[in-house]
Image (spheres, helix red, strand yellow):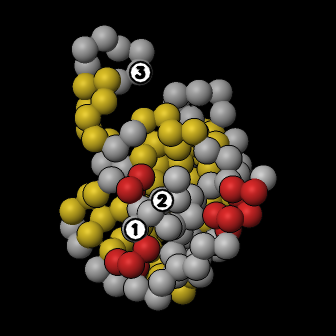
Amino acid sequence: SYLEVEAKDIKLGADFTTNRGKLPWPVDQKAVLIPFGRYEVPGFTKIYDDNPGLTIGTPLGSSVKAVFDGEVIAIHNYGEAAAVIIRHGKYFTSYGNLSSVNVSKGTMVKTGQVVGRAGDSEYSADGMVKFMLMVENKNVNPAAWLRR
């Protein structure tokens, strides 16, 4: 559609700070399952938790892509899933719940480069990604940084 073409034509600034509201989503097909911040745990009444990022539903095995140029500084494996953390100056992005990882620590990645594949979802029959954005060591709402 026209809006999709327009969004792809958005030029990112060289400094992460200048790209609030302009960053591409880490997955092409997306549905926010759990937003940033306090939420009621699905399947439970009056049980709340805090989400440090966005839990994004997407088809299982979907490509998960870097939202900005940076350096892979860590890969964490937990059970059958993994997370990739990328440094963008004082900003960091984390791509969690990956079923596979396509990069290694020390890799310099470009915006849109595939860093892994979406893993199983505990909230739906499909896949999901846990996407976080940190400024130094503080989690911030990544939705404010992603294209509408």
Image coordinates for residue 16, horizontal then vertical, percent: 40, 79
Residue where numbered disc 3 is placed: 42
- Residue type marked 3: Pro
- Residue type marked 1: Arg
As drawn, 72 above or below 80: below
Q: Earlier in the sequence, mark 1 or mark 3?
A: 1
Determine which quarter of the picture holds residue 8: bottom right
Q: What residue is at 25 percent from the left and 14 percent from the top?
A: 46
Classify mark 1: residues with Cα within 10 Å, few (<14), some (14-19) or many (20+).
some
Q: What residue is at 62 percent from the left and 55 percent from the top?
A: 27
Is 136 situated left or right of 104 in this image? left
Residue where numbered disc 1 is placed: 20
- Name of the residue lying farthest toward the top: 45
Number of numbered discs: 3
**Is residue 102 among the parts visible in the rendering?**
no
Residue where numbered disc 2 is placed: 146
Q: Earlier in the sequence, mark 2 or mark 1?
A: 1
As drawn, 135 above or below 2: below
Determine which quarter of the picture holds residue 135: bottom left
- Judging depth in this view, the residue of 11 and 50 nearest the camera is 11
Image coordinates for residue 131, horizontal then vertical, percent: 45, 54
Q: Earlier in the sequence, mark 3 or mark 2?
A: 3
Disc assigned to residue 107: none
SS for dot 1: loop
Determine which quarter of the picture holds residue 43: top left
